[in-house]
Amino acid sequence: MSLEEYKGVFTFAQQVDHKLEGVSFELIGKGKELAKDLGVEVTAVLLGSGITDLADQLAEYGADHVIVVDDPKLENYRTEPYAQALAGVINEFKPEIMLVGATAIGRDLGPTVSARVKTGLTADCTQLDIGQFPLNADPADAKQNQLLMTRPAFGGNTIATIACPDNRPQMATVRPGVMIKCEPEKGKKADIIEFKPDLTENNKYVEILDIVKQVKKTADIMEAKILVSGGRGVGGPENFSILEDLAEVLGGTVSCSRAVVDAGWKPKDLQVGQTGKTVRPNLYFAIGISGAIQHVAGMEESDIIIAINKDESAPIFEVADYGLVGDYKKIVPALTEALKSVKESA
């Protein structure tokens, strides 16, 4: 493998039902930062059927080029045709970096493609940088301009930085909600490159017999501007009504920690943390949440964090902007009533 042949930052633009997922724009935003450090451009890879019209959205969010693979076999996600398509793009265009969202689709597609193109992949990254490897080596002995891929390891108890210095592309899946989208440039048009890889049906193709769509009954906490999050310290599912009252008066949404989901009090769609969702609200209430590193990893980028906990030594206070030590059953209702009074008098 000649590493010099590989140039550019590529991102996988995931679309479902002709709608681009938010992580697609987040990857382009991060890709622009990496590309600037390397002096290259960002190319989004769009796979599907009848999806060429989505290319301009990717351009508005910063993609310099969009490779479109438009084929009826890609109408719905299936591992084999999508893997053939993305591997075909990589083999043809030879990107230096390939980023994929760590969604249900990305976590299936990324590792499959990395094996096809004989490179490594770092999963569930929370940070990406360009630097030297090994990190602490003398610069004269280190390899420069490497993608440094950072992710939680050992259950979130430590952070690992991983590189892939001897193979290309350098591949990573990136958690949704971690990277920041660029501000869209309305009206920007894409430089579209149409590509037709060889999609060959084989015994790995599956047949989709039926697609059952379930209407979500829970809010998308990743889009919420205000989150009122409860943990094990709330005491039980019936007590979440106290948090719901606060969320209602603030115009926010209730979320929770993993302990709450494991106890069956709330659905997983509301879970914040390393094994849940990464959120960036303007205001985040952490109520009865101890502040384990796995939870903090999912909410530490919130603009303002307010923690309420009986334990004054709880780790959550280390990341909170404001902390209240006491019984949330007294504090939260009092706060809710005060906010109601302010709204009524406004």
Image (tube, rainbow, N blue to C red):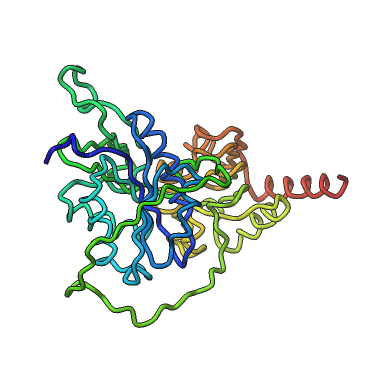
Decide if residue 80 is on the left or right side of residue 36.
Answer: left
Decide which of 257, 5 is in the foreground and name it: 5
* Residue pictured at 41% horizontal, 45% vertical: 27
Q: Is residue 202 above or below residue 68?
A: below
Q: Quadrant of residue 326?
A: top right
Give percent across and percent down for residue 309: 57, 42
Decide if residue 304 is on the left or right side of residue 70.
Answer: right
* Residue pictured at 16% horizontal, 41% vertical: 167
Decide if residue 338 is on the left or right side of residue 302.
Answer: right
Q: How many marks?
A: 0
Decide which of 160, 82 is in the foreground and name it: 82
* Residue pictured at 58% horizontal, 32% vertical: 321
Decide if residue 254 is on the left or right side of residue 199.
Answer: right
- Is residue 158 visible in this depiction of the protein? no
Residue that lies at the very extreme toward the left in this rendered image = 1
Quarter of the N terminus within the rendering: top left
- Is residue 56 visible in this depiction of the protein? yes
Residue that lies at the very extreme toward the bottom in this rendered image = 209
Give percent across and percent down for residue 303: 58, 37
Give percent across and percent down for residue 3: 17, 36
* Residue pictured at 61% horizontal, 59% vertical: 239
Quarter of the C terminus within the rendering: top right
Give percent across and percent down for residue 202: 17, 73
Q: Quadrant of residue 135?
A: top left
